[in-house]
Image (cartoon, rainbow, N blue to C red):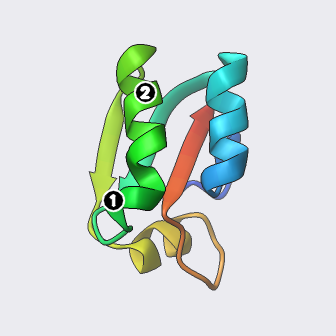
Amino acid sequence: MEEFKNINKTVGLKQSLKAIQKGIVDKVYIANDAEERVVSKIINLCTEKNIPIVYADSMKQLGKACGIDVGAAVVSIVK
């Protein structure tokens, strides 16, 4: 998994939803171990807006790639 430390991004469900709705997202990363009910809205919105989704192995891995000490269910790469 690539590192996201120096890339424009939003970390977390609420921030990612806002960014997707604004139309400023290029790609979304979702952790495989995130709860389906939590990420289903993001998945549906990405499908609707043709935003590519990449699945990460775990929330821990996704958080680490962002340089944070906690897991992340969703990370959006901003244009």
Residue 63 image point, x, y percent: 54, 71
Q: Is residue 4 above or below residue 46?
A: below
Residue at left 66%, top 23%? 21
> What amino acid is labelled 1 in the image?
Glu
Task: Inspect this view and state whether residue 50 appears.
Answer: no
- CB atoms of marks 1 and 2 within 8 Å: no
Question: Residue most toward the bottom?
Answer: 69
Q: Nearer the viewer, residue 67 or 30?
A: 30
Residue 8: x percent and y percent? 70, 40
User: Helix, strand or loop at disc 1?
Assistant: helix
In front: label 1 or label 2: 1
Location of mark 2 (residue):
46
How many other residues sit within 10 Å of disc 2, few (<14), some (14-19) or many (≥20)? many
Question: Residue at 39% across / 31% down in the picture?
Answer: 44
Name the residue tied to disc 1.
36
In front here: 4 or 9?
A: 9
- SS for callout 2: helix
